[in-house]
Every structure is written in structure tokens, then in C-alpha cells.
Image (tube, rainbow, N blue to C red):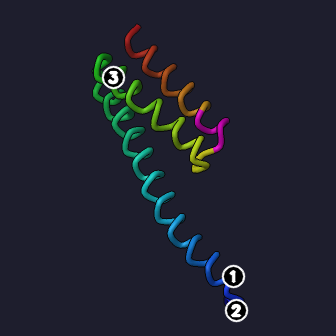
Amino acid sequence: MANTPQSKKRARQIERRTEVNKARRSRIRTFLRKVEEAIASGNADAAKAALLAAQPELMRGVTKGVLHKNTASRKMSRLSARVKALSA
């Protein structure tokens, strides 16, 4: 349990930051789910559009510290390969 004023303040800050990060992670997952659904439906144009919308969200998650850079790159690479295979 936080005892000093500084540790109490840090606990409050962490609580607020956790909420922001949770919302950001949820937003990223929503964009990724839209890409997955477009791939599952077999619609190449929708999948490509969803992928283009998801890419900046993933990278924003990296800059905000929600995702590791390699994780975002791996997800983008795998999704774009699947979209490319769908359109071919």
C-alpha cells in the first residue's frame, strides 16, 4: 500500500494511465478485428481498406508505448500477407 505522498500520487497516475492504455489497446484490437472480418468474408477491397486504416493505429500504439515495435511490425506483416494472398 502506498504510504508516502509521492507513492500515493504515482498510484493515482498509474490508475489514469492504465485506463488510457486500456482504451487505446481496445481501439487497436477493433481495427485488427475489422481486418480479420474482411479477410474472412473474402472481400479483398474491404480487407485492403481495413488494413490501411489499421496500420496507423498499430504504429500509434507503438509510439504511445502500448505495443512493442516488433509486435506491431509482426502483426502488420502477417495481416498484409494474408490480404495480399486474398487479392491474388
Question: Image check: 32 left or right of 18?
Answer: left
The stretch drawn in magenta includes residue 69? yes
Identify residue for label 2.
3
Question: Image check: 37 left or right of 71?
Answer: left
Contact, mark 2 vs mark 3 (Cβ under 8 Å): no
Q: Which residues are magenta?
A: 68-72
Marks 1/3: CA distance? Answer: 45 Å
| Relative vertical location of residue 71 with respect to residue 4 in this rendering, above or below | above
Kind of residue at disc 1: Ser
Residue drawn where x is 48% and y is 51% of the image = 25
* Count of marks placed on residues: 3
Q: Position of residue 85 (x, y in %)?
A: 45, 14
Q: Position of residue 9 (x, y in %)?
A: 61, 79
| Relative vertical location of residue 82 with respect to residue 7 in this rendering, above or below | above
Contact, mark 1 vs mark 3 (Cβ under 8 Å): no
Q: Position of residue 1 (x, y in %)?
A: 67, 90
Which mark lies nearer to you, 1 or 3?
A: 1
Question: Image check: 73 left or right of 50?
Answer: right
Kind of residue at disc 3: Ala
The main secondary structure of the magenta stretch is helix
Quadrant in which the C terminus is drawn:
top left
- Name the residue nearer the viewer: 24 or 82: 24
Label 1 crowd bin: few (<14), some (14–19), many (20+), radius 10 Å: few
First in sequence, mark 1 or 3: give its number: 1
Residue drawn where x is 42% and y is 57% of the image = 23
Marks 1/2: CA distance? Answer: 6 Å
Kind of residue at disc 2: Asn
